[in-house]
Image (cartoon, helix red, strand yellow):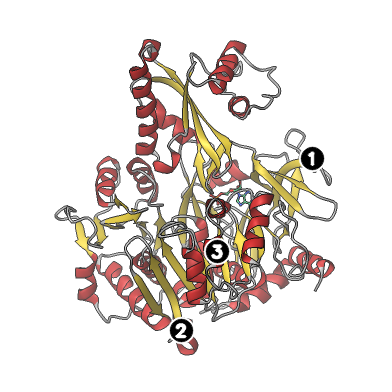
């Protein structure tokens, strides 16, 4: 194929949506066929394959038993605990049934929510699949999020059960999960009745709360060997909720359906990730993020691959560990973030050369802008093609990719995330006029509704918020906004240039400025605070905090200033999570605002990056901006 042929493939996916997706839908098993491919009678809500019934767990596990029962489904490698465990599809079936039986035993039924707050361990995946097996809706909360953050998600999802572990480990340090759960459930207004603990024996001091906490090993032995029939659910039945940050302080529950999700991910394994059933994929991410949901768990398993589940850092015990895994398990496809590759780039290149990575065909990178030097370095050192792909929690699978049918042999242009994936009717819109912009012009990347299968169906429990957040950015209410800046070249390739809203992307992890600011405002000595994302060579962006103290006398002594600085960083780590801890805290007397009282975050960000702050005509108090400028340039001033 060629670019021209791909264009035809893409055109058909838009112009003959129903025909195109009906073909892709054959990649999954249906209990009952759908009545129609798409119901778009209530725009912008798209209902894919209504009338059809299927089950994600059946597609990820049961249907492979006959052909691949003895093939490895999961290979778990933890360089934190030193464990390596392998599960064939048959063994996975047994584990998932055990988990489903445990959940059933706790009264979890179709439509009930289950929050999963766990480190990277196979039981987290058994729990996810156990939920969807019985039609329950999981909501995985990233283990790096703090107790308050977990509490907010619990209050929104209202789970019947929460599943956790005693502890995880990162870089050799123990991270206790259970005390965070205890704290979260103390402050949550709707705590679940039961907490199931997968005890790894890491935290010997862990104490269960009597009457609430249950040990997974005990429950499992009660249900050993039980088989739980698959609960066939409607295609539009929610499969999971995954919270993500936006511009407000309240995270949004991205809700995904079942049928569209199954079809989109399975099709992407073939068309975008160019994998074949039976091969091994290594997605180095975390199940707490969308990349983990889609390409550690559902995509590879539904397409019959072996998926590597890795707990640990890319540089421990040494920076060759990932390439050793590639060699030892014959990995053909790898997926991670640009930040992880930048971390490896800092290391001695001999570690890369030590292992035979010839099984690797493609290295996919996503989650943040991929800079050219990193892309070139990775492809030269590994001898593979580096494939940038761009998407979001909301879409669940790539919007743009440099790997699509027909583009396999096209030269990759470093810095470009590629072409629009089939199913996505992509356009770039002028921020002010809302008109479409032409090649070479910067615009906000938008997608014409209906969004393709697999994308979010709504915000959990809040249809209005779905419409108001995503479909109200442009005069044309049929346009979904990604809130990302992009440019299209004449040849059709897209370049993504970062967020147009107040979302910060630290090492591929999405954080909301409001959440960080609210955490700082809870500090008893902080009058006001602003958080901005500032460009960083390794992490893409880091958080800078600009803080107005209630009493500036606190800053008069070195010790006072240091203590306030430390405690501001700490409160963010405590309330949002360690990943949000500000890299720098600057004290100012006032924050620059517009006359209508809106914080001028873009101006602050520009100054912190030593750029021109742009249009300041709406600025209320120019002195405040000057203060930010001098603070950012001279932190000790
Ligand atoms: P998340 O929902 O956490 O996956 O974050 C999604 C955001 O990450 C997007 O809206 C982009 O801002 C950014 N992003 C993801 N992939 C890419 C990429 N390949 N290039 C540039 N930015 C990306």
Determine whether the residue tagged by mark 3 lies in a helix, strand or loop: helix
Which sits in the foreground, 95 or 222?
Answer: 95
Which sits in the foreground, 521 or 316?
Answer: 316
Residue 478: x %, y % from top left:
70, 48
Which sits in the foreground, 357 or 29?
Answer: 357
**Which residue does the image show at 40% across and 39% down from the upper left?**
576
Give the vertical position of 98 relative to 128 (above or below).
below
Q: CA gap, disc 2 to disc 3?
A: 28 Å
Give the vertical position of 522 relative to 552 (above or below).
below
Total numbered labels: 3
Which residue is the site of mark 1?
A: 435
33 left or right of 19? left
Query: Which tag is nearer the camera, tag 2 or tag 3?
Result: 3
Label 1 vs 3, first from the N-terminus = 3
Which residue is the site of mark 3?
A: 352
Residue 160: x %, y % from top left:
30, 57
Q: CA gap, disc 1 to disc 3?
A: 47 Å
Q: Which mark is residue 289?
A: none
**Which residue does the image show at 26% across and 43% down from the upper left?**
183
Label 2 vs 1, first from the N-terminus = 2
Residue 28: x %, y % from top left:
56, 77
Residue 323: x %, y % from top left:
52, 67
Determine whether the residue tagged by mark 1 lies in a helix, strand or loop: loop
Let me know if residue 240 appears in the view: yes
- Quarter-of-image position of residue 93: bottom left
**Which residue does the image show at 29% across and 44% down from the upper left?**
184
Which residue is the site of mark 2?
A: 71
């Amino acid at each position: 194929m060629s670019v021209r042929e791909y264009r035809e493939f893409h055109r058909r996916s838009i112009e003959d949506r129903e025909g195109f997706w009906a073909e892709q839908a054959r990649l999954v098993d249906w209990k009952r066929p759908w009545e129609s491919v798409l119901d778009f009678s209530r725009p912008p809500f798209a209902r894919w394959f209504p009338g059809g019934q299927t089950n994600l767990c059946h597609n990820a596990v049961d249907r492979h038993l006959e052909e691949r029962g003895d093939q490895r489904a999961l290979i778990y490698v933890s360089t934190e605990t030193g464990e390596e465990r392998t599960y064939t599809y048959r063994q996975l079936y047994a584990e998932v049934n055990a988990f489903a039986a445990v959940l059933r035993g706790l009264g979890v039924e179709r439509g009930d929510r289950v929050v999963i707050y766990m480190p990277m361990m196979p039981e987290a995946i058994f729990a996810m699949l156990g939920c969807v097996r019985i039609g329950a809706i999981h909501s995985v909360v990233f283990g790096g999020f703090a107790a308050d953050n977990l509490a907010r998600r619990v209050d929104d999802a209202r789970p019947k059960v929460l599943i956790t572990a005693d502890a995880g480990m990162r870089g050799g340090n123990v991270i206790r999960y259970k005390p965070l759960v205890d704290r979260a459930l103390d402050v949550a207004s709707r705590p679940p009745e039961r907490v199931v603990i997968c005890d790894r024996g890491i935290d010997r001091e862990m104490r269960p709360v009597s009457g609430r906490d249950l040990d997974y090993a005990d429950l499992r032995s009660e249900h050993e060997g039980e088989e739980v029939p698959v609960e066939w659910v409607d295609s539009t039945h929610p499969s999971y909720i995954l919270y993500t940050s936006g511009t407000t302080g309240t995270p949004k529950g991205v809700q995904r359906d079942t049928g569209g999700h199954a079809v989109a991910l399975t099709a992407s394994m073939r068309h975008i990730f160019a994998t074949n059933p039976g091969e091994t994929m290594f997605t180095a991410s975390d199940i707490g993020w969308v990349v983990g949901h889609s390409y550690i768990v559902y995509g590879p398993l539904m397409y019959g691959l072996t998926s590597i589940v890795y707990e640990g850092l890319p540089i421990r015990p040494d920076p060759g560990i990932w390439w050793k895994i590639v060699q030892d398990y014959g990995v053909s496809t790898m997926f991670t973030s640009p930040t992880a590759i930048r971390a490896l780039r800092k290391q001695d290149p001999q570690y890369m050369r030590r292992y035979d990575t010839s099984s690797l065909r493609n290295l996919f990178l996503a989650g943040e802008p991929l800079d050219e030097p990193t892309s070139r370095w990775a492809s030269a050192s590994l001898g593979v093609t580096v494939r940038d792909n761009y998407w979001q929690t909301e879409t669940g699978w790539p919007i743009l990719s440099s790997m699509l049918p027909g583009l396999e042999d096209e030269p990759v242009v470093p810095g470009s995330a590629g072409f629009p994936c089939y199913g996505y009717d992509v356009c770039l819109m002028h921020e002010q006029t809302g008109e479409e912009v032409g090649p070479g012009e910067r615009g906000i990347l938008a997608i014409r509704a209906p969004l393709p299968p697999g994308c979010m169906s709504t915000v959990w429990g809040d249809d209005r918020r779905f419409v108001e957040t995503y479909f109200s950015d442009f005069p044309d209410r049929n346009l979904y906004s990604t809130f990302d800046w992009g440019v299209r070249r004449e040849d059709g390739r897209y370049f993504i240039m970062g967020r147009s809203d107040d979302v910060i992307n630290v090492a591929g992890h999405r954080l909301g400025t409001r959440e960080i600011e609210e955490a700082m405002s809870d500090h008893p000595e902080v009058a006001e605070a602003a958080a901005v994302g500032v460009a960083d060579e390794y992490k893409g962006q880091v958080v800078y905090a600009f803080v107005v103290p209630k009493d500036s006398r606190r800053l008069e002594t070195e010790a006072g200033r240091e203590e306030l600085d430390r405690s501001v960083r700490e409160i963010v780590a405590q309330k949002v999570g360690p990943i949000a801890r500000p890299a720098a805290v600057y004290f100012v007397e006032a924050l620059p605002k517009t006359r209508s009282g809106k914080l001028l975050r873009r101006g602050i960000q520009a100054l912190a990056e030593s750029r021109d702050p742009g249009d300041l005509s709406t600025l209320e108090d120019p002195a405040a901006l000057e203060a930010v400028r001098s603070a950012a340039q001279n932190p000790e001033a």
